[in-house]
Amino acid sequence: MPSLEYFLVARAFSVDQWTNLVSVFEIVEEVHPPAFPVDLPLRAICCWNSTGEEVGKDFQASIVLRRDEAVSGPHHVNFTWKARRHRLFVDLNVNVQGPGDVVVELNLNGAHSASHTITVHQVATVQG
Amino acid sequence: MVNNPLESLRSGEFDARMHWASTPEALFALLSKSEEVRALRDGLRQGTLHEQDAGEFASQLMRAFQRGVLFPHDLALCGLAVALSQWHTEFAREFLRSVAGLRLAEMRMSWRVAKIALEKRESGSQSEYRSFRSDSISAPRAAFVVFHLVGDAPDKHRCHVLPDSYDATELEPCRV
Amino acid sequence: MRWRGFSERSFQRCQAVSGYNCFGHLWASRRTCIPDQPACDIVLEDDGFRALRQGEDVQPGDIVLYWMGSVGLLHVAEVMWNHSDEQNSVGSNPWVLSKLDAFGPEIYHHLSDTTYHRHQAQYELRVEIRTERDRKSPW
């Protein structure tokens, strides 16, 4: 089974076409929305490292989002392993209904790989 | 060397130099060091050469293919494969896979050299882009290329693949 | 008949032919390609090829190895003749027979009549002559 190198949720990323290096911008750890519900356009960025035996085989990654009792997903991504390291970049539109910790879970072939937690703060109120 | 970096792969001078390499590995290494392949790589990096140009050039070369006759542009195809071996895009990968899969007796080294290029890429990292769209769960993202200066040298450019800023309403919302 | 990239004095021994490369020409009687350098290393060792000693003349049957920087062993050729001219003393003007890749012709040319010699520093070319004339019978 491949091992997970990294899993992050961020606002943007880039892959250098010349060096094939990944850069990640604005890793999202917490948000302060002006109101609810709020749309959070985010990218899930992950990379697995294989032993080489996985090349050519089919895999299924799943993303599940949880906030308290609310669950969205699993959202499946099917792919064929192509190289020593396989990266997956997934665009997400996370629609948050209220404050709390949004846990983004990553699974591979049904097994839990990693989680990334985003703290969604209460809407700030002006007291006057 | 002719001005068009692609056309230089068809020159007699290029042919004369590459004929010395007797194995695909030696040819790959020799091509990697050649000024023609360096010019192609620079062109891709700087945006003066586009993937579409490379694709059309390869199609032109393949029009000369005839069954039972040694393919006359085999070394040119090798040069293109080596140039694309370090270009990390879906186009480059598919091109190398196509050439590596040919395995025709009429093609001397090109499919072997493309195979070496693929093996080198497979020892690295492969990227896959997905999004959950309302109409399709696994549609690949479009990407655009951004050029920016590296340091103070105006001739040094880095190409990045940045997912374009998309309209989040196009995506299936994940409600939590 | 002169093949491209060679000087006027070279000549083409036979037309372009597939089935063997330069290594196969030298060590497999033109019957097959020897595919990679590790296989050549085995032959060089097994057959006892050694570098020429100081003052030792090049002789027909010796081999010329063309090494290039990070490429490794680029090409081998067989010494066919070693003749003098007004500029060189006897024994230092070897002519070789080269098979160009696995699909090219055989060319008879001077040892240094190559594109890479004309830009030697750029290509980090190194030419080495070896011989196995000390080979002894195993029994």
Image: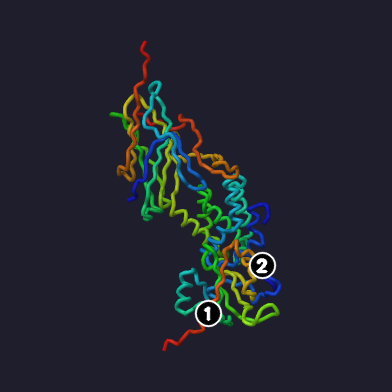
- Residue assigned mark 2: C5
Relative depth, front residue between A30 and A75: A30
C-alpha span from label 2 to label 1: 31 Å
As drawn, C131 above or below B122: below
At mark 1, the secondary structure is loop
Q: Position of residue A15 (x, y in %)?
A: 48, 43
Q: Amino acid at mark 1?
A: Arg
Q: Residue furthest top?
A: A128
As drawn, A85 above or below B19: above
Which subunit holds the residue at mark 1?
C
Question: Splitting the image into 4 quarters, where does residue B147 fall?
Answer: top right
User: Which image quadrant: the C terminus of chain B?
Assistant: top left
Question: Splitting the image into 4 quarters, where does residue C66 fall?
Answer: bottom right
**Disc 2 and disc 1 on one polypeptide chain:** yes
Q: Position of residue C8 (x, y in %)?
A: 71, 72
The label number, if any, that marks residue C53 in the structure image: 1
Q: Position of residue B160 (x, y in %)?
A: 52, 42
